[in-house]
Image: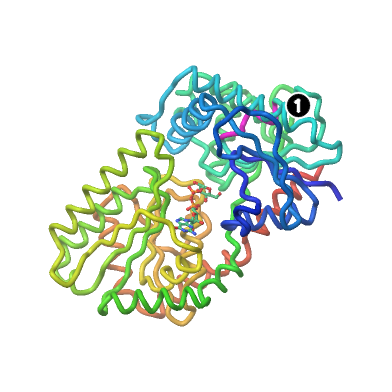
């Protein structure tokens, strides 16, 4: 059996400091690494001289990290990854910054990763690189003469060709992907847009079984939607902590239905538009005030980036305005919380909510939508309102689909969800749950690694 090598910007294998793997991806990859005696490489999250890789084996899983100098963090992580690729790949050209220094830093850090990781790779290792921070890494490793099977998975959307060509070095970036053997996308839609680029910009041809040939080099590109640790999350929703959370939510709701949103504080998640949609609901339905309240959990992220500080300021003001305009002495329409909670508490919150409001403007997949569905009571499930622009909409077809840009659409969907009969709620929920259980995170991992092992 080959070893599995996972490489991503941040490592979420368990360590002495953080003993439990956090989240589905970490759980699935950790399990695979334990089985395959592999190593998870990445950035430590610390700034400092790069130095040697720091290895740590904890609970049967080895992680290996390096620090990065401040300039590298600024140009590679806060720069090219989060000010250039992230906004561009989420269709936000207006927020995208085009700086040569960022691109230079990005390529430099990828070369550094290649240089420190390369010597630790053995000939039979399967190598799986994750996400937009590391696109050129496969190419860097090939330059060192590596002939291993190399796979890449993109967690975020693949942008339309016309958008991508706004990036001065678009061609170089895509060519780097051809160093891999298998490239995975979250959805058929992102795979199609990738095909469009390859055929129209590179003169590539598409073959059977995901094969794409450009200039004599053939790779395989597949749609491979990520899932959640479904069984574990279902169990989490019945844990003591989830039950206690559920009771607290019921007690504080005074008979009103809960609408819940859980998102990293990120402009791609459509929080401003969601708040506007909720406000439209409150304005246009006179009985609203006696029947709903909304909880938005939004732990801040990437606050070194100005656009993230801006969206935070906007949401502070907007949530204040909504509460100022609509609150009563005994009712606050919007509880807006900028902190994270343990997974069991989240599961309890999801289960208490009549509506899961998941309205990103663009999202590679969106795992919150899947977690919300998994946490529901089978006898009395809530309704998932889902953006048609989330990757998850390809699989969760029986959600109430909305256009996240339209406040009226969101307001109407809230009204529809609140009025929905139990029969209809069950009929919509069941196929979604089946999909989530069947195509869980282990399914995803196996689907990708199986494709990677096929010569
Ligand atoms: C990227 C892509 C793709 C959130 N608040 C808390 C908390 N969370 C957890 C959620 C969920 C995860 O964070 C967020 O995952 P998403 O999929 O929603 O979004 P991104 O962070 O943008 O992830 C995305 C994903 O990669 C995987 O491929 O689906 O499209 O953008 O699991 O539950 N977890 C805890 N407390 C919180 O307060 N414990």
Does residue 286 appear left or right of residue 68 in this picture? left
Q: Is residue 251 above or below residue 413?
A: below
**Which residue occupies the foreground of this view, 349 or 46?**
46
Q: Quadrant of residue 433?
A: bottom right
Image x and y of residue 74, in percent: 48, 27
Q: Is residue 88 above or below residue 343?
A: above
**Which residue occupies the foreground of this view, 414 or 326?**
326
Residue 137 belongs to the span the image colors magenta:
yes
Does residue 37 appear left or right of residue 271 in this picture? right
Whether residue 210 can be seen here? no
Magenta span: predominant SS is helix
Which residue is at 43% across, 75% downward? 381
Q: Residues within 10 Å of mark 1 (few under 14, many from 20)?
A: some
Which residue is at 81% across, 46% downward? 3
Q: Quadrant of residue 278?
A: bottom left
Image x and y of residue 241, in percent: 48, 74
Residue furthest toward the bottom?
379
Asked if the beta carbon under badge 1 is closer than 8 A to the nearest atom of ligand 1, the reply is no
Quadrant in which the C terminus is drawn? top right
Residue 441 belongs to the span the image colors magenta:
no
Does residue 50 appear left or right of residue 148 in this picture? left
Whether residue 29 can be seen here? yes
**SS category of the residue bearing label 1:** helix
Instruction: Give the residues in magenta.
Output: 133-139
Image x and y of residue 77, in percent: 51, 32
Image x and y of residue 24, in percent: 59, 58
Which residue is at 56% across, 29% downward? 197
Kindly identify which residue carries mark 1: 142
**Which residue occupies the foreground of this view, 280 or 235?**
235
**Total labels drawn:** 1
Which residue is at 61% across, 33% downward? 67
């Amino acid at each position: 059996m080959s070893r599995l090598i996972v490489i991503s910007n941040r490592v979420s294998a368990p360590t002495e400091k953080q003993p439990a793997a956090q989240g589905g991806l970490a759980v699935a990859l950790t399990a695979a690494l334990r089985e395959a005696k592999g190593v998870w490489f990445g950035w430590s999250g610390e700034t400092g001289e790069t130095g040697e890789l720091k290895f740590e084996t904890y609970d049967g899983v080895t992680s290996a990290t390096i620090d990065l100098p401040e300039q590298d963090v600024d140009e590679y992580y806060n720069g090219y990854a989060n000010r250039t690729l992230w906004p561009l790949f989420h269709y936000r050209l207006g927020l995208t910054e085009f700086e040569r220094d960022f691109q230079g830093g990005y390529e430099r850090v990828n070369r550094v990763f290649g240089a420190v990781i390369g010597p630790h790779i053995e000939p039979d290792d399967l190598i799986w690189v994750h996400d937009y921070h590391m696109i050129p890494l496969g190419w860097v490793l090939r330059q060192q003469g590596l002939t291993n099977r190399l796979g890449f998975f993109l967690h975020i959307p693949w942008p339309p060709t016309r958008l991508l060509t706004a990036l001065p070095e678009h061609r170089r970036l895509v060519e780097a992907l051809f160093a891999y053997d298998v490239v995975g996308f979250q959805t058929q839609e992102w795979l199609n847009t990738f095909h469009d680029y390859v055929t129209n910009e590179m003169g590539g041809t598409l073959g059977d079984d995901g094969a794409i040939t450009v200039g004599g080099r053939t790779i395989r590109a597949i749609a491979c939607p990520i899932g959640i640790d479904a069984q574990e999350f279902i169990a989490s929703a019945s844990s003591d902590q989830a039950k206690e959370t559920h009771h607290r939510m019921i007690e504080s709701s005074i008979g009103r239905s809960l609408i819940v949103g859980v998102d990293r504080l990120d402009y791609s998640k459509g929080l401003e538009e969601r708040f506007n949609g909720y406000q439209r609901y409150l304005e246009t339905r006179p009985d609203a005030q006696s029947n709903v309240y909304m909880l938005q959990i939004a732990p801040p992220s990437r606050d070194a980036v100005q656009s993230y500080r801006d969206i935070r300021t906007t949401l502070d003001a907007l949530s204040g305005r909504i509460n100022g305009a609509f609150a009563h002495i005994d009712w606050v329409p919007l509880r807006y919380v900028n902190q994270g909670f343990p997974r069991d508490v989240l599961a309890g919150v999801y289960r208490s909510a009549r509506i899961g409001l998941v309205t990103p403007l663009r999202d590679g997949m969106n795992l919150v939508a899947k977690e919300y569905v998994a946490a529901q009571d089978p006898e009395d499930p809530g309704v998932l309102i889902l953006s048609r622009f989330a990757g998850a909409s390809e699989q969760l077809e029986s959600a109430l689909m909305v256009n996240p840009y339209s406040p009226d659409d969101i307001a109407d969907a809230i009204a529809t969800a609140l009025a929905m009969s139990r029969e209809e709620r069950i009929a919509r929920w069941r196929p979604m749950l089946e999909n989530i259980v069947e195509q869980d995170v282990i399914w995803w991992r196996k689907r990708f690694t199986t494709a990677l092992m096929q010569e």
